[in-house]
């Protein structure tokens, strides 16, 4: 009697659900200090954008609690285009403050994060714990696209390997 491979008959899965937290762990924001105090100048924010090659900063109050976001768009639309002196404009006067920010819970899926970004045409999301209590990090649309590409590459590789006989079932090595 022939034995079947242990995973024969298991359902094909595109991978485990990728969460906002998983995306943040691979994000460029995971490696840099992307917080800025609300009393800092807009110019300091722009310097950070350039230094870290990022487009958004999490705005904190004096207790280091995240209270908003400051993006390149905020700078362009509320400082540069109206010719304000960026050295004298405080972040809190031109950023988007809570509760007007869209956030992702750390367990939100890749699709949920993308939907949230598309609703308001955002390029960045703050990531909070599932109780909306603690700020965890920030993710960008670029981070989400990288994950979609990685996920699609894995699927294509598995299907190609299967087609050429490299594996008798999905997930075989």
Image: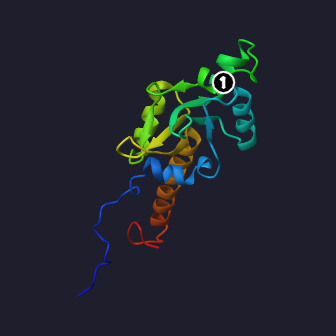
Which residue shows up at 46% across the image and 64% down it?
163
Q: Camera-side residue: 168 or 56? A: 56
Which residue shows up at 38% across the image and 40% down it?
132
Relative vertical location of residue 140 with respect to residue 119 in this rendering, above or below: below
The location of residue 140, given as percent across then percent down, is 56, 40
Q: Dot 1 surroundings within 10 Å: few (below 14), some, or many (20 or more)?
A: some
Q: What element carries label 1?
A: loop
Please indicate whether residue 172 sits to the left or right of residue 45 in the image: left
* Mark 1, residue position: 90
Please indicate whether residue 6 sits to the left or right of residue 42 in the image: left
Q: Camera-side residue: 79 or 41? A: 41
Please indicate whether residue 80 sits to the left or right of residue 150 in the image: right
Q: Can residue 38 be seen in this view?
A: yes
The location of residue 94, given as percent across then percent down, is 61, 21
Relative vertical location of residue 113 with respect to residue 14 in this rendering, above or below: above
Image quarter in which the N terminus is found: bottom left
Please indicate whether residue 7 sits to the left or right of residue 64 in the image: left
Q: Can residue 94 be seen in this view?
A: no
Q: Quadrant of residue 13?
A: bottom left
Which residue shows up at 29% across the image and 79% down it?
4
Which residue shows up at 73% across the image and 18% down it?
80
The location of residue 44, given as percent across then percent down, is 73, 33
């Amino acid at each position: 009697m022939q034995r079947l491979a242990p995973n024969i008959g298991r359902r094909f899965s595109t991978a485990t659900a990728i969460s906002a937290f998983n995306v943040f762990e691979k994000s460029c924001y995971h490696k840099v200090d992307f917080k800025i105090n609300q009393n800092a100048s807009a110019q300091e924010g722009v310097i950070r954008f350039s230094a870290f090659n990022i487009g958004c900063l999490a705005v904190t109050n004096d207790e280091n609690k995240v209270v908003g976001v400051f993006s390149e768009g905020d700078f362009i639309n509320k400082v540069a285009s109206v010719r304000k002196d960026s050295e004298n404009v405080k972040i809190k006067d031109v950023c988007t403050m809570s509760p007007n920010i869209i956030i992702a819970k750390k367990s939100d899926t890749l699709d949920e994060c993308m939907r949230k970004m598309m609703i308001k045409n955002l390029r960045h999301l703050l990531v909070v714990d599932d109780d909306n209590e603690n700020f965890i990090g920030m993710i960008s649309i670029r981070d989400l696209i990288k994950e979609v590409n990685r996920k699609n590459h894995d699927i294509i590789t598995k299907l190609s390997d299967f087609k050429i006989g490299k594996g008798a079932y999905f997930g075989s090595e």
